[in-house]
Amino acid sequence: MDYYHRTMSLASRQRSDMGIALAAVAGLILCAAASHAQNPPPPQAPAAAAHGLPGRYDLKIENVRDGVLYVPAGYKAGTAMPLLIWLHGAGGSGNVSTNMTALADEFGFIVLAPDSREWTWDAILGHYGPDVEYLQRAMQQTVSRYSIDRARVWLGGFSDGASYSLSLGISYGDVFKKIFAGAPGVMQPIEVNGKPPIFISHGLQDQTMPIDETSRTFVPRLKALGYEIIYKEYEGRHQLPPEILREVIEWFSKS
């Protein structure tokens, strides 16, 4: 069985426990802000004094699988910036590439790139829960340390990260205001909240997530449900070309 069909088989098992775990995401930004206001963090130790300043930081929430936060060069405390939550593909980890950091500096947004708890995201393995909870903790930490524009919280990713972005983003479009999915393989929202615009891209020669079984199926379904969709096909296999990433960031950045 190839990767796409194995993924579909695993994902079909998870719908029963998805609702409980996803409930943690609804309103988590507002909850984080309220918690921060009621329980401000203690004075920072010297080693943590850089928080609130531009730069690249390990999340340091857990010791093994953790993630990265990138704060662009133009960040100023007290001036709200958009937040892009960027989800990696199978076998990867939270990383902010040099292309992404350059775009974050140019367009002015913070990037939160968490690690999945296992080698890919929990829902794709058939058991929603641990990754949603970790994402909540990572977002709470980010909101407590940086000024985030809550009207511009974006969710995106590539491959399995795209599948997870679609499922979470559609389920909680009242939290995630725009969604990007690059070469997704699964689209299984548990419910619908809000109706965020969605950008989907896919390589024509993709053999990992075959385009006819994935994006060319997802896009008509989403359009029929009234979603605003941008859809780009490009020459290439299972990859996200730099020019497509730039187009996505330009789209995110439009008000």
Image (cartoon, rainbow, N blue to C red):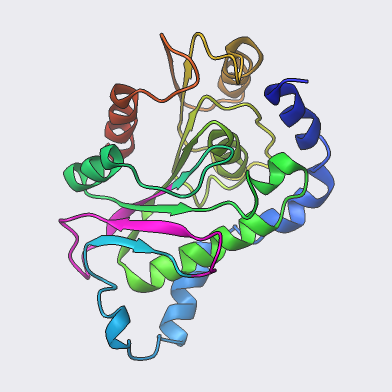
| Image-based side of 15 in relation to 56, left or right | right
Q: Residue at x 57, y 36 (%)?
A: 166
75 inside magenta stretch: yes
Is residue 108 shown above or below 185?
A: below
Assign the C terminus to one quadrant of the image.
top left
Residue 62 visible in the picture: yes
Residue 133: x and y, percent?
A: 63, 62
252 inside magenta stretch: no
Extreme-bottom residue of the structure: 43
Is residue 236 shown above or below 243?
A: above
- The quarter holding residue 106 reads top left
Instruction: Magenta stretch: give its range.
Output: 61-85
Is residue 236 shown above or below 43?
A: above
Q: How many numbered discs, if any?
A: 0
Q: Nearer the viewer, residue 203 or 1?
A: 1
Residue 79: x and y, percent?
A: 21, 64
Residue 98: x and y, percent?
A: 27, 41
Residue 144: x and y, percent?
A: 39, 73
Q: Nearer the viewer, residue 144 or 96?
A: 96
> Which SS type dominates the magenta stretch?
loop
Residue 190 visible in the picture: no
- The quarter holding residue 71 reads bottom left
Q: Residue at x 25, y 74 (%)?
A: 50
